[in-house]
Image (cartoon, rainbow, N blue to C red):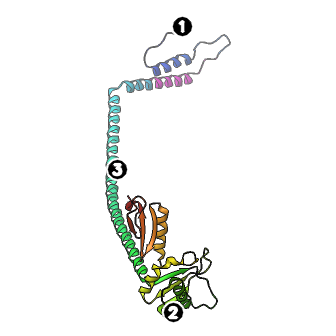
């Protein structure tokens, strides 16, 4: 026959079933089992009573409405503490973020201020470079450079230049009309060192520039003394592809617009080639 299922609490049933299984028999077996002593039996009965009492208390706890109320109260308190903790963390983060944003705004204002100052400094530096280049170029208005003139041993540069100008360009000039003249360091592309000449009278310099084309085919050429910045400006303008031609005249860099050939631009340092040729 199948064992009858015991209704009630599963934990109580478990101990009850075990108690039924483990309860010792008081009858003697055919093999001559010896009955237990009265003291051992009393101890077992006491243990069973204790176990039964504990199970009863446990059952009461499992069904006690006060326990449920206490558990619900604990749950509510924990939820409240969690909400309060979450609110505190959120308030702390808001406070920190507010301070960070405020600090960032201050830093952004300082950066903008520094950028403005840097822009003004940069503009001032560009203006100073432009003015300095113009002044240096102006100081060279009495100078000419001569390229391709053959070098001679123990040559007198003033006499060589005066002879060249008189014989090739037909301009009357004496060595005394030249303030100073000397050779410059030779570059890799030059066969002879170029020569720089400073005239006492600017009128003679202008006359020489007017007829310098007469030197075409001689291997000798004459040009104005150009600052390094203006020479770089000429090279950059030629490389830009925005001009048909670029040249230097009377202390200025000039360029003909490739789109409108009637327009001639005066170029200066830091000029935007694209902007002026639109």
Residue at point 34% right, 36% down?
74
Instruction: Tell me the SS state at disc 3.
Output: helix
Label of residue 175 in the image:
2
Q: Is residue 50 one of those drawn in magenta?
A: yes
Q: CA distance from mark 3 to mark 2?
A: 87 Å
Residue 126 position (above or below residue 95): below
Label of residue 2 in the image:
1
From the image, state whether disc 1 or disc 3 is nearer to you.
3
| Other residues around mark 1 within 10 Å, as few (<14) / some (14–19) / many (≥20) | few
Label of residue 152 in the image:
none
Viewer-proximal residue among 136 and 10: 136
Residue placed farthest to the right in the image?
31
Instruction: Tell me the SS state at disc 2.
Output: helix
| Other residues around mark 2 within 10 Å, as few (<14) / some (14–19) / many (≥20) | some
Q: Which residue is mark 3?
A: 93
Q: Position of residue 160 (x, y in %)?
A: 56, 88
The answer to whether mark 3 and mark 2 are in CB contact below 8 A is no
Q: Is residue 263 one of those drawn in magenta?
A: no
Q: Position of residue 47 (x, y in %)?
A: 50, 25
Viewer-proximal residue among 198 and 67: 198
Instruction: Tell me the SS state at disc 1.
Output: loop
Magenta part of the chain: 34-52
| Other residues around mark 3 within 10 Å, as few (<14) / some (14–19) / many (≥20) | few
Viewer-proximal residue among 101 and 268: 268
Q: Which quadrant of the structure image shows residue 182?
A: bottom right
Residue at point 42% right, 26% down?
58
Instruction: Say which label, 1 or 3, has the lower sequence index.
Output: 1
Residue 205 visible at all: yes
Image quarter hosting the C terminus: bottom left
């Amino acid at each position: 026959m199948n064992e009858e299922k015991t209704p009630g609490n599963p934990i109580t049933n478990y101990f009850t079933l075990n108690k039924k299984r483990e309860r010792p028999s008081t009858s003697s077996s055919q093999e001559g089992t010896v009955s237990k002593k009265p003291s051992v039996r009393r101890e077992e009965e006491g243990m069973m009573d204790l176990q039964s009492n504990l199970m009863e208390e446990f059952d009461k706890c499992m069904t006690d409405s006060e326990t449920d109320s206490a558990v619900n109260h604990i749950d509510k308190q924990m939820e409240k503490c969690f909400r309060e903790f979450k609110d505190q963390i959120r308030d702390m983060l808001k406070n920190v973020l507010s301070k960070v944003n405020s600090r960032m705004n201050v830093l952004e204002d300082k950066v903008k201020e520094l950028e403005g100052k840097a822009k003004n400094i940069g503009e001032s530096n560009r203006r100073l470079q432009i003015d300095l280049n113009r002044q240096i170029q102006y100081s060279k208005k009495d100078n000419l450079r001569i390229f391709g003139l053959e070098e001679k041993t123990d040559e007198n540069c003033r006499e060589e230049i005066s002879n060249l100008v008189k014989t090739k360009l037909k301009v009357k000039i004496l060595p005394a009309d030249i303030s100073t003249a000397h050779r410059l360091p030779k570059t890799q592309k030059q066969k002879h060192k170029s020569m720089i000449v400073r005239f006492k009278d600017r009128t003679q310099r202008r006359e020489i520039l007017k007829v310098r084309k007469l030197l075409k085919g001689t291997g000798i050429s004459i040009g104005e003394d150009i600052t390094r910045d203006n020479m770089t400006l000429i090279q950059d303008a030629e490389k830009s592809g925005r001009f048909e031609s670029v040249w230097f005249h009377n202390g200025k860099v000039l360029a003909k617009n490739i789109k409108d050939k009637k327009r001639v631009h005066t170029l200066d340092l830091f000029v935007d080639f694209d902007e002026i040729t639109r």
